[in-house]
Image (cartoon, grey):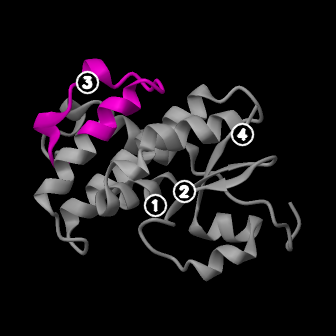
Amino acid sequence: MGLFSRKPELQDQALSELGQMFASPDLVADDPTPGSELLDPSRLAFTVESLGFVDNYLDEMRKRKLDENGEDYSKLVLRCGAYVGEVILRNAQGTPFHWLDYKGALKINKTIADFGENLGSAAALWDSEAGLWFPLAKVQKFLDNGREDSVRFFAEVVIEKSK
């Protein structure tokens, strides 16, 4: 790889592990995802259908009004957003998706700088055909706006566009 290569470093393993932390609360019993008592691992099988359950979970978590600058909020957005992205990655049948961090996404599309580096842009799903998608930001939007920002609908649209 040349010195000026624009190829981003993939973050597939790290985000896959974060998604697994959300889907399997027992893996992180000593550092639980906020609201883990609401999560039923048998319903979190990385399917598009499981995102209906995630929408319900997020609806309940909205009522708790977590501090957006707090550790619990960050943990929820990172783990839940990674789960949503993993559902897309595992169910898309077109171009394969990969995870990128903010700097990697910036290498793909310089306009990402307009959004700035923050929790919602910390990780992006990328495919060379459809571009960049931000599941973590979608989770934040759901927490802000409710069901109008359904993660299931988001995933269905992204998967459809990847065909």
Depicted 20 relative to depicted 76: above or below: above
Regarding residue 65, the answer to whether it shows in the image is yes
Q: Which residue is mark 4?
A: 161
Q: Considering only order in the chain, which callout, 3 or 4, is on the residue closer to the N terminus?
A: 3
Three-letter code, disc 3: Pro
Depicted 70 relative to depicted 54: above or below: below
Q: Considering only order in the chain, which callout, 1 or 4, is on the residue closer to the N terminus?
A: 1
How many residues crowd mark 3 within 10 Å: few (<14), some (14–19), many (20+)? some
Residue at the image position 31 percent from the left and 63 percent from the top: 144
* Left or right position of 28 against 117: left
Marks 3/2: CA–CA distance: 24 Å
Q: Considering only order in the chain, which callout, 3 or 1, is on the residue closer to the N terminus?
A: 3
* Mark seen at residue 137: 1
Q: Considering only order in the chain, which callout, 2 or 3, is on the residue closer to the N terminus?
A: 3
Q: Which residue is mark 2?
A: 134
Q: Which residues, given as a range, are shown in magenta? A: 33-56
Residue at the image position 33 percent from the left and 60 percent from the top: 145
Which marked residue is nearer to the observer: mark 4 or mark 1? Answer: 4
* Image coords of residue 118 (percent x, y): 45, 74
Q: Are marks 2 and 1 in contact (CB under 8 Å)?
A: yes
Q: Say whether residue 44 is magenta.
A: yes
Q: Secondary structure at mark 3?
A: helix
Extreme top residue here?
Answer: 42
